[in-house]
Image (cartoon, grey):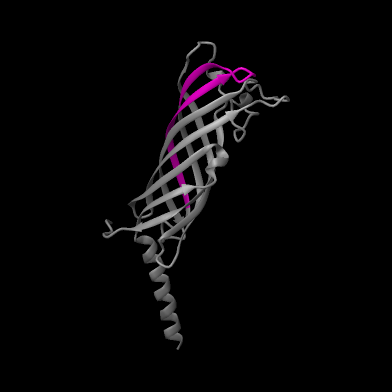
Amino acid sequence: MKRWILGSIMFLLVGHASAQLAKQRLFKVDPLSFVFKELRLSVEHRAFKDYFWTLSPYGYHHFWRSRSDEQWGRPTFPQKYYGVGLRAGARRYFIPKGVSPHGFFVQAHVGYRQLWIHNYTTGLQIVDKSRLGQGMIGGTVGYQWISGPRKDFCYGFSGGFEKLFVLNYHSSSGLFDKSDVTANWYEFPFLLHGRSGLRLYLGIEVGFAFLQKHLHW
């Protein structure tokens, strides 16, 4: 009886680990991204054992309107931001060992985003249209679960930091420069009056995991 119980437990554990290891590609969305004025999608692809490549395109939209008690030196005039971006990175799963892409992970990424900015008067008349190109580098940690009857459903969370830097800027009127690009509320406005480019990155990932037919290691 004891051998039967022990054998059953081992079978379930091995089957669980095999189901995770058979996952090669994941497609996910981030329902939390709207809080950060973004719409994020992501693809995760196994490179080797516990290592995965990640590719995350996203859209960006933000309307900035300063408060009367603005204290960080950010623009006092309204602005609208529209943009697209792409993050590419690598992810490594650590704990528990041997069941990736389930478990604790660390990730590093680089990226680029292109923004189109409309600068308004306080009466909401457009006075300038600007373009801004930004590069980025960042890192996150998180945890991901693979669940469901066939281990096809994935969900998890991640958190970390991201550093943005200006690559190019153009103002149609010549009246504005990159210092007029406002910091969003989730950045750290107390650093260099909100223009440090340092921002908090938080995400929730929900999606589907797909099998691979042939393991290649």
Give the residues in magenta. Answer: 105-133
Please state the horizontal and vertical placement of residue 114, each as a whole percent of the image.
44, 28
Please state the horizontal and vertical placement of residue 40, each as a whole percent of the image.
47, 42
Left or right of 47, for residue 184? right
Of the 4 image quadrants, the one containing the N terminus is bottom left
**Which residue is most to the bottom?**
1
Residue 103 visible in rendering:
no
> Relative to the observer, which residue lies in front, 149 or 212?
149
Q: Residue at left 52%, top 51%?
A: 157
Quarter assignment of residue 180:
top right
Q: Is residue 108 above or below residue 101?
A: above
Q: Residue at left 72%, top 24%?
A: 68
Please state the horizontal and vertical placement of residue 52, each as a whole percent of the image.
38, 49
Q: Is residue 40 above or below residue 61?
A: below
Left or right of 64, for residue 40? left
Q: Is residue 20 above or below residue 135?
A: below
**Which residue is most to the right?**
69
> Relative to the observer, which residue lies in front, 192 or 32?
32
